[in-house]
Image (tube, grey):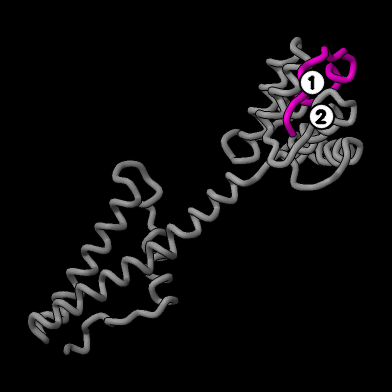
Amino acid sequence: MSLDAPPLTPDADTARRWAVEELAKDEYREGGTSWLERILRWFSDLLEGIGQGVGGAAGPTGTVIAVLVGLALVALVLWLVVGPLRRSRRAAADETLFDDERGAAALSESARAAASSGDWTTATLDLYRALVRRLAERDVITLGPGLTAAEAAARAGAALPALASRLHADADAFDGIRYGHVPATEATYAHVLDSMRACESARPRLVAAEAP
C-alpha cells in the first residue's frame, strides 16, 4: 500500500474533525444545492479517493475494503451530524409554556428587570408566562401538564373573547421568539404588557370546564 494512501480506519475524533471542517466551508451556508447533497458529493469523492488508493495496491479485495470503510465512515458522520439535530428537534417539541414554577408576580418582576436592561427576549417570554399564570391564579383558565402557548391563548380567548385575537398574537410571538423564528423587540414586550393590563380589567365569561 502506498504511504500516501488515506487512512482506512479513522477514529471518531478524526471523522468528526473531517465532518466539521467540511461543513464549515462557506459553500454549505450559501444557497443552491442542499447541504445533504453536498455532504453526499463529498463522501462520494472521498470514497473514490480511498478506492483508488487501496484498489490499485490490493486489487478487488482492496476495493471492497475501501467500500466497506467508506460506508462505515458515512454512517459515523451521519450519526455525528444528524443525531444532535434530531435530539434538539425532539427537545424543542417537548418544550412547553412553563419550564419553572414561578408565580405571576415573580415572572412579572423578571420581565420588568429584563426590559430595563434591554433583554427583550427574556422580557417578552417571562411576561407572557406571567400573563398566563395570572389568568390561572384568577381561575380564568386552568393549567395542565404540557400546556403550550397556543393552547393557553385558546383557553384565555374562550373566557375573554374580546381579547382573543391579541392573545393569539402574543402566543404566536412567544413561540416565534422562543424558537428563533422572529426577533424579540420592545414592541413585542409592549404588546404583551397591554394584553396583560387588558386581561386584568376584563370580565371573563363562564365557559365549560377544560380538561387539565
Please count the marks in the image: 2
In the displayed structure, does residue 46 sit left or right of residue 145? Answer: left
Q: Which mark is residue 195?
A: 1
Is label 2 in a helix, a strand or a loop? helix
**Residue 61, position in %: x, y?**
12, 82
Q: In which quarter of the image is residue 196?
A: top right
Q: What residue type is labelled 2?
A: Leu
Is label 1 in a helix, a strand or a loop? helix
Check disc 2 and report the residue beneath it: 131
Identify which residue is drawn at 35% across, 50% down: 35
Q: Which amino acid does label 1 sit on?
A: Ser
Q: Quadrant of residue 64?
A: bottom left
Residues 144 and 76: in front is: 144
Instruction: Residue 205: say if magenta.
Output: yes
Q: Tell me whether circle 1 and circle 2 mark residues in contact (CB < 8 Å).
A: yes
Query: What segment carries the magenta color?
Result: 190-212
Residues 76 and 43: in front is: 76
Q: Label 2 crowding class (10 Å Cα cut-off): few <14, some 14-19, many 20+?
A: many
**Residue 158, position in %: x, y?**
73, 17
